[in-house]
Amino acid sequence: KNNMEITIADSAGKAVTDAKVVVSYSMPPMPGMAPMNYKTDTELKGAAYRATLNYSMAGSWNNEIRVTRAGKTASLKFTIDAK
């Protein structure tokens, strides 16, 4: 299991603590294997959102963090190479 900590700040640099933050992660499909697509909510602890992810095997994992606040949604996509 892997812990992820997400810190969000507004344009003035103040911590955002009133958003809904969801992390989606998946491994690109491989022949003969079922798709691996997961989603987890985060929990606000102090000024950071925390989530536990389970990269169940080594390889490249696609990640997306979706932040919803005041009816607007923004997202960030990145890849993690699990070893």
Image (spheres, rainbow, N blue to C red):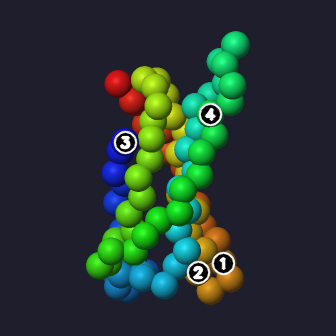
- Image quadrant containing the C terminus: top left
How far, Cα to Cα, is label 1 from label 4?
A: 28 Å
Residue 23, above or below 34: below
Residue holding disc 2: 69
**Residue type marked 1:** Lys
**Residue type marked 2:** Arg
Mark earlier in primary sequence (4, 3): 3
Element carrying mark 2: strand
Residue holding disc 4: 36
- Which of the pair 80/35 is nearer the observer? 35
**Residue type marked 3:** Lys
Query: How dense is the environment of label 2, judged by Cα within 10 Å: few (below 14), some, or many (20 and up)?
Result: few
Element carrying mark 1: strand
Nearer the viewer's eye, disc 4 or disc 2? 4
Mark earlier in primary sequence (3, 1): 3
User: Answer yes or no: do the residues labelled 1 and 2 have beta carbons within 8 Å?
Assistant: yes
Q: Residue at x 63, y 40 (%)?
A: 37
Q: Is residue 33 visible?
A: yes
How far, Cα to Cα, is label 4 from label 3?
A: 15 Å
Residue holding disc 3: 1
